[in-house]
Image (spheres, rainbow, N blue to C red):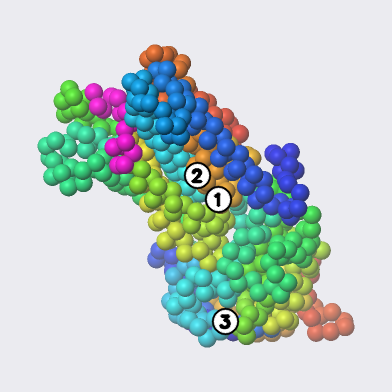
């Protein structure tokens, strides 16, 4: 369980997050949605321990503020929005960095873990390429492979572990968007927890168990995707008129951009 | 580049250059042994290293000639070689460490003013050691000079880091410009001190300032060696952290690296290695930028191999540069700093040209 209670963040004198409450349970994907600049990345950074915050954040009941770097690294892995490298590492060398903490928990040993992680993100055969010479979407998947190596086992020694993903699919084509979301769902089904910033409300509706809707640094709605996908709520937060539909076969709501008007 | 990558050794997973890197480290060790052997066998006099080695094993009669040879080998050539190895290794490793720390292949103690800061520390001791700083010199003895240079290098590095790095991001432009400013400031303060120096000190300073291994003595080695070795010994512990740091500070922390402690250790090592090297050999430039760059082209940037490789290649190249400096205008001697600059400065320009897109200028 990740629990954030009354989390506020200010940079300089500017308040960025204001009293956000959020939680995610093992076995679930929690999506963070909201307009640009609403504080989604900042919330991920607070959960990752990157910035000072007021309020409390706990992982599996343990206060994040009291955790040492290595301890946190064994509990969660973080995928940033984008990662540039300062030196010409190969893809294999980048993915291998995920093994640094030594708490991957892979049942088959570590030797071929980078290759397996790359295959999982559909980058088999890329191990020998230079990271800096890949496309943005390929780089993002290499980083995901690295992150997966860090917490390969979703549950280690009885503790659920977490993936914190900031816009994991924003530079990916549709095939790989689905692939990445399925990886997240598999991770959750095996007992881990996932928090992901998503821009695509349809992906959120299709894959997440819970959604947190952010606006101006506050969480304005939280609940199931159906509860968040409401015409008025979305229209108000995203500042354009949106009309939610429902697929005939089920409960999954969807949004068509052509049904929206500014 | 692709060609070099495909030249991996069989058996290793694709993209894993470890086996190649280990092979290269072995070759570099052989290179250093060869260069050191060559250096000990050649010099201004015709002293024969072979006869000295022979005398270790054979109970030959001591002759006047072999005693002279032995003196030349033990007290002139050997200290110069040992000092060359220590200085070359520490300059190259400082460069590699600083590039990893600043996440930038252009960071080098010589280029961004750290050597100038170390030089100011050294000049302060040389000029004021007899008067104002007399008690300090009495207390620290032969270590005064390297420690003063260490302090100067440390202050400069800390200032640079504070100015050029914001929220874990180092701006190349700020780093280079701040380096220019700090080097100019150190230079100006050094100038004031030189103005105060007497004739004897002035001779010391000129000799030292050009960058030379010419004054190598065992005393200098005992003064600088322990500091340099201490700095070199800590670097393998920083290697994995520096690799993680190339992803950015936040990502390194997410992987479990205690980033602040690691940066402090890296800064201390750079300042110690640069300071000690500058104290005994003056301003020898460009080793720290050329050596790691060449190595990255061959074995990649993995710091577990880059750092020891830099030590070995830096030592070899400096011994070679020293050989050039002793022979090219023989029987006179060119300061080694001139030799490294003649080869290193164009190389630096070439690196700049290739990586122009990397610079946010
Ligand atoms: N380092 C910073 N300094 C000042 N303001 C910042 C900083 N980082 C983010 N902000 C501001 O905080 C708000 C939220 O940013 P962010 O969390 O990145 O938004 P998003 O929801 O798009 O990920 C934005 O208005 C942004 O301008
Ligand atoms: Mg964002």
Chain ID of residue with mark 1? B
Q: Which residue is mark 1?
A: B303
Q: In which chain is the residue bearing label 2? A: B
B8 above or below B75? below
Residue B11 in view, yes or no: yes
Q: Which residues are magenta?
A: B203-223
Q: Nearer the viewer, residue B150 or B327?
A: B327
Q: Which residue is mark 2?
A: B96
Using residue A123 as the reference point, say whether residue A44 is left or right of it: left
Left or right placement of residue B122 versus residue A206 in this view: left
Residue drawn at point x = 36 percent, y = 31 percent: B74
The answer to whether tags 3 and 1 share a subunit is: no
How many residues crowd around disc 2 within 10 Å: few (fewer than 14), some, or many (20 or more)?
Answer: many
**Quadrant position of residue B64:** top left
Does residue B204 show up magenta in the picture?
yes
Q: Is residue B274 above or below residue A165?
A: above
Front residue of A4/B120: it is B120
Find out if the beta carbon at label 2 lies less than 8 Å from the nearest ligand 1 atom. Answer: no
Dots 2 and 1 on the same chain = yes
Q: Residues within 10 Å of mark 3 (few under 14, many from 20)?
A: many
Of marks 2 and 1, which one's residue comes earlier in the chain?
A: 2
The Cα–Cα distance between marks 2 and 1, rounded to whole angstroms, is 8 Å
Relative to B79, is A84 above or below? below
Quarter of the image for residue B143 reads: top left
Return the x and y of residue A75 as percentages of the image width and height.
58, 76
Distance in Å between CA atoms under marks 3 and 1? 35 Å
Give the percent coordinates (x, y) of residue A22.
57, 81
Q: Which residue is mark 3?
A: A2
Taking depth in this image into account, of A222 and B44 the one nearest to the observer is B44
Q: Is residue B272 left or right of residue B193?
A: right
Evaluate if marks 2 and 1 touch, with contact meaning CB atoms under 8 Å apart.
yes
Residue A3 at x, y percent in the picture: 55, 83
């Amino acid at each position: 369980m990740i629990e954030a209670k009354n989390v506020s963040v200010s940079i300089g004198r500017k308040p960025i997050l204001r009293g956000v409450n959020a939680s995610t349970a093992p076995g679930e994907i929690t999506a963070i949605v909201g307009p640009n600049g609403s504080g989604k990345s900042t919330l991920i950074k607070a959960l990752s321990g990157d910035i000072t915050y007021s309020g409390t954040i706990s992982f599996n009941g343990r206060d994040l503020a009291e955790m040492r770097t290595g301890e946190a690294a064994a509990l969660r892995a973080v995928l940033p929005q984008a990662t540039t490298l300062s030196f010409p590492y190969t893809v294999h060398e980048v993915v291998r960095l995920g093994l640094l903490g030594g708490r991957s928990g892979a049942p088959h040993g570590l030797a071929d873990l980078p290759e397996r992680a790359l295959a999982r993100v559909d980058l088999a055969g890329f191990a020998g390429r230079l990271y800096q010479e890949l496309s943005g979407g390929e780089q993002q998947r290499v980083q995901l492979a690295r992150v997966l190596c860090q917490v390969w086992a979703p549950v280690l020694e009885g503790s659920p572990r977490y993936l914190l993903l900031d816009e994991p699919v924003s530079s990916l084509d549709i095939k790989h968007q689905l692939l990445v979301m399925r990886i997240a769902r598999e991770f959750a089904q095996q007992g881990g927890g996932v928090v992901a910033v998503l821009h695509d409300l349809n992906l959120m509706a299709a894959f997440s168990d819970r959604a947190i809707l952010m606006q101006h640094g506050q969480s304005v709605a939280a609940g199931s995707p159906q509860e968040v996908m409401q015409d008025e709520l979305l229209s108000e937060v995203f500042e354009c008129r949106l009309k939610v539909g429902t697929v005939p076969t089920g409960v999954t709501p969807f949004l068509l951009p052509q049904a929206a008007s500014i | 580049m692709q060609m070099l990558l495909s030249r991996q050794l069989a058996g290793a997973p694709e993209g894993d250059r470890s086996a190649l890197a280990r092979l290269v480290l072995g070759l570099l060790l052989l290179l250093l042994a060869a260069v050191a052997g060559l250096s000990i066998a050649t010099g201004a006099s015709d002293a024969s290293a072979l006869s000295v080695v022979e005398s270790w094993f054979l109970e030959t009669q001591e002759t006047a000639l072999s005693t002279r040879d032995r003196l030349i080998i033990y007290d002139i050539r050997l200290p110069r070689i040992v000092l060359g190895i220590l200085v070359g290794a520490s300059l190259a490793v400082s460069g590699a460490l600083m590039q990893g720390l600043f996440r930038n292949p252009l960071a080098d103690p010589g280029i961004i003013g750290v050597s100038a800061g170390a030089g100011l520390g050294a000049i302060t001791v040389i000029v004021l050691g007899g008067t104002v700083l007399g008690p300090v010199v009495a207390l620290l003895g032969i270590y005064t000079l390297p420690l003063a240079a260490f302090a100067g290098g440390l202050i400069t590095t800390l200032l640079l880091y504070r100015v050029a790095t914001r929220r874990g991001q180092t701006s190349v432009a700020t780093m280079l410009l701040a380096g220019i400013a700090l080097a100019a400031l150190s230079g100006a303060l050094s100038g004031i001190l030189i103005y105060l120096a007497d004739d004897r000190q002035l001779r010391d300073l000129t000799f030292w300032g050009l960058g030379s291994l010419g004054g190598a003595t065992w005393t200098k080695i005992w003064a600088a060696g322990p500091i340099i070795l201490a700095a070199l010994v800590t670097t393998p512990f920083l290697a994995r952290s520096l690799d993680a740091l190339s992803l950015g500070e936040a990502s390194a922390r997410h992987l479990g690296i205690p980033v602040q402690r690691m940066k402090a250790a890296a800064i201390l090592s750079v300042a110690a290695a640069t300071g000690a090297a500058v104290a005994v050999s003056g301003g020898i430039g460009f080793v720290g930028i050329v050596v790691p760059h060449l190595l990255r082209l061959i074995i990649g940037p993995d710091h577990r191999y880059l750092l020891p490789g830099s030590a070995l290649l830096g030592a070899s190249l400096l011994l070679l540069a020293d050989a050039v400096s002793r022979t090219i205008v023989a029987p006179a001697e060119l300061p080694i700093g001139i030799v490294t600059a003649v080869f290193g400065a164009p190389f630096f320009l070439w690196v700049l040209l290739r990586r122009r897109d990397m610079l946010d200028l």
